[in-house]
Image (spheres, coloured by chain):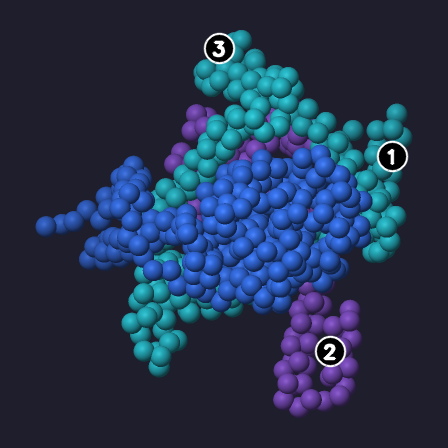
Amino acid sequence: MSVCQEIVRDAYTNAGRPEEYDSTDVFFIAGEQFSYTAAVDGLMMREKPAANFFLGTFAAESLLLAEAGAMTGAIQIAGTDSTYQIPFFVVACDYCLIGEELYAASAYLSHEPRLMGTLRTADTVKIIIAILLFLSVTMVTINQWTNIEILNIIKHIFTVL
Amino acid sequence: MRINYQKIMSIDRRIIYLIVALAIAIPTLHPLNLPVFITPDVRGVFEQIEALPPGSPVLVTVDYEPSTTPEMDPMAKAIIMHCLLRDLKLVSISYLIYGGGIAEKLFKDIQELYKFQSGRELVYGKDYAYLGYKPGEYAMIIGLGQDLKATTKLDHYGNSVYELDILKDLNKLENFKYMVCLHDDSYIDYWIIYGYERTGIRIGSACTAVMAPGMYPFLQAGQITGVVGGLKGGSEYEKLVNEKYNLKKPLNQARAGMDAQSVIHMVIILFMLLGNFAFIMKSRQEKN
Amino acid sequence: MEFWKRRVPLIIVFCAGMTMIITYYIPQQWATDVLTGYSKWFQVIQGFALLLGVVSLTQVHSTKILKQRPGWAYSLVMMISFLTMMISGFVWGIKEGKAFMWIFNNVTTPLASTVFSMLAFYIASAAYRAFRARSLEASIMLISAIIVMIGRVAFGEMLSQLLPDSLSFLKLDEITQWLLRSPVGAAKRAIVIGMALSGVTISLRIILGLERTYMGSD
């Protein structure tokens, strides 16, 4: 909670409005999943925010939150690393950041060199993994038909690794 | 007569909720007794346990929250009953803090079921043991892989693990012949990474229906042997156990819930088709 | 002051992060003990962080009750429930048969299950509202959802029984299994690889002190 308060305070400062920050706007609700969900649903119904941003790790509460938000007519943007909840957010929210788009969003919005560098690194490694996957699938497929010794050795190396 | 398709597309939510409530309540009160068909994924867990000789040690982890007990309890009872009826040495542990209360209630129910079936009571420490919630998350799993007793020390009831008969020959995770992870979130990922990959222990997944599709990459890679997913998986497992062991009081909790689930699936499909029909007709009306 | 406010936290983060990474790759008992020790410390710190949350919770709700702001009755119910659980846990303990466990088994668990079961209603209304064939992708999603929903229940399997073996590729339960294993499995693997890589890069940035938003600005 303290980290969240610091981040929100910095955001207000960077936007040039530090006096508008109220620390009671960032508060702890509950540690238990559905207590948290019930509280946030109630908050959304009473406060009727114009926009809801669901960013982070979510479990079964994802659809409960998104649907309650949809009932209030708010615009909803979601982003989660929980692969099991992405379908629910895709269906119930206006926009959804899928998988690593959540991490790329900050680089995309700020264009800060350090963040762009992180994104570039992740993309480069992804390309390397994709190439390795393609090569290994090709080798295993060819080996299936031909049983070439060198392919067996390479396959054994990867199995050991 | 001009139909107002926009009205159909924006039906009051409360009407939808009422129809859903009826679709769940009616089959629950008047069971349809729909048949249960067994899938290879559930067989993957059942046959692994069935293939173990009596006396083999099995680990069952109780890693689900109170909110998912209606979905998880039926399959948990079916799997634990299977292990006990097969005379396997059952050891249970929890990675999640809620596991303690849930496992206590689970074993209390199992005691009654087992006594009704076999005529004798389960002996704690000989037939089964519950080691309780152990903090440390993945460090706990790594510790189990190196020295089970040093990592756990006491069971849930305060008994020293060094004095439990059932743990006499069990010193590491790899000494278990099989393990079943009862989970409602991605806790099984840690058991696979720090359990299967480090020690080679074979794992079966028993999870909620939402988690089940996410288990297929592990299943296809051979990191788990099978998936018991949701109420459907639970009903299949119950059927397998009931048929194999001719239970005097057949396990029926999951199967009873499947009637309502089958009906509600069809109702939701009808809603989707109705919404799309109204959408298409409205588009045509606007074009004309 | 700058040293204590900025440098010391960075040093702690760097040392803790590097220790966790290094001990993971050392298959020795002492490394496991270090990891276990870290995890236990983490849980202790989590407990204290929860205390901060409880203080914040109490502050927000008691202010609302005292100033009788709109919705103060809900805050009063929250505070009474919170104090009841806390006092019963501290005074009588949390073992089976005590008040705390009775409340947990008979109030908390059914309430949590009830809120969870609301998903059934919300899924129906979300499906009705959102599953519209507006585009090719939406249509594919709609058809897949219908196939999987029928294939996963008894009706799908009963329909499949009616098909001859020569048309087994049309069996809904088999199409469902293929959908779950192939396209869904492939998509999940891709998303997990991408997220894991991003997670690694961000963790490295935090460990190396490049990412400092958690410390706040000066």
Give how far apart the Cα atoms at labels 1 and 3 are.
44 Å
Q: Are marks 1 and 2 on the same chain?
A: no
Depicted B48 relative to depicted C120: above or below: below
Q: Quadrant of residue B180?
A: bottom right
| Of the two numbered discs 3 and 2 in the rendering, the one whose residue sits closer to the viewer | 2
**Which residue is situated farthest in the left direction here?**
B1
Q: Name the residue that disc number 3 marks.
A: C68
> Residue B29: where, in percent of width, then height?
28, 43
The chain coloured cyan carries which letter? C
Q: Which chain hosts label 2?
A: A
Q: Name the residue that disc number 1 marks.
A: C7
Give how far apart the Cα atoms at labels 1 and 2 are.
47 Å
The amino acid type found where label 3 is placed reads Gln
The chain coloured blue carries which letter? B
| Of the two numbered discs 1 and 3 in the rendering, the one whose residue sits closer to the viewer | 3
The amino acid type found where label 1 is placed reads Arg
